[in-house]
Image: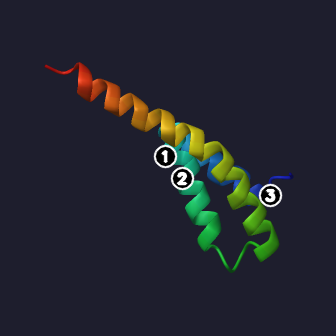
């Protein structure tokens, strides 16, 4: 999948902000999903599906980590 210059700039900006990777992926997914003016519908669907493949496992890991931290607290 090719990345457009606009998408590349958005990714760079989010990386420079030093945000957590899960937040960045969710933010990009939501922005692309809602961008009906700049992103063609077929491309938008492809990108959203691809990002969701990466978000799912990270989201599960995040919640498992939170649950294990809660169990360790006295």
Q: What residue appears at the point 49 percent right and 46 percent down from the top-left corner?
A: 23
Location of residue 1 in the rendering, given as x and y in whole percent from the top left corner? 86, 51
State how far apart marks 1 and 2 are (Cα): 5 Å
Disc on res. 52: none
**Nearer to me, 61 or 34:** 61
> Residues at badges 1 and 2 in contact (C-beta under 8 Å)?
yes
Disc on res. 4: 3
**Nearer to me, 48 or 61:** 61
Whichever of labels 3 and 2 marks the residue nearer the N terminus, that label is 3
Q: Please, what secondary structure does the residue beneath circle 1 have? A: helix
In which quarter of the view is residue 63 placed? Answer: top left
**Nearer to me, 10 or 29:** 29
* Farthest-out residue, left: 74
> Residues at badges 3 and 1 in contact (C-beta under 8 Å)?
no
Q: What residue appears at the point 63 percent right and 53 percent down from the top-left corner?
A: 10
Location of residue 35 in the rendering, given as x and y in whole percent from the top left corner? 64, 73
Whichever of labels 3 and 1 marks the residue nearer the N terminus, that label is 3
Residue receiving disc 1: 23
Residue receiving disc 2: 26
- In the picture, which quadrant includes the C terminus? top left
Rate crowding at label 2 as few (under 14), some (14 to 19) or many (20 or more) other CA atoms within 10 Å: some
Location of residue 42 in the rendering, given as x and y in whole percent from the top left corner? 81, 72
Can residue 16 be seen by looking at this rendering?
A: no
Location of residue 16 in the rendering, given as x and y in whole percent from the top left corner? 54, 39
Comparing marks 3 and 2, which lies closer to the viewer? Answer: 2
Task: Please state if 28 lies on the left or on the right of 19 as rendered.
Answer: right
* Farthest-out residue, bottom: 37
State how far apart marks 3 and 2 are (Cα): 18 Å
């Amino acid at each position: 999948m090719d990345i457009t210059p606009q998408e590349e700039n958005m990714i760079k900006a989010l990386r420079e902000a030093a945000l957590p990777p899960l937040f960045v992926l969710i933010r990009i997914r939501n922005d692309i999903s809602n961008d009906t003016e700049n992103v063609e519908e077929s491309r938008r669907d492809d990108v959203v599906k691809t990002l969701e493949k990466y978000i799912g496992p990270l989201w599960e890991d995040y919640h498992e980590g939170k649950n294990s931290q809660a169990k360790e607290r006295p």
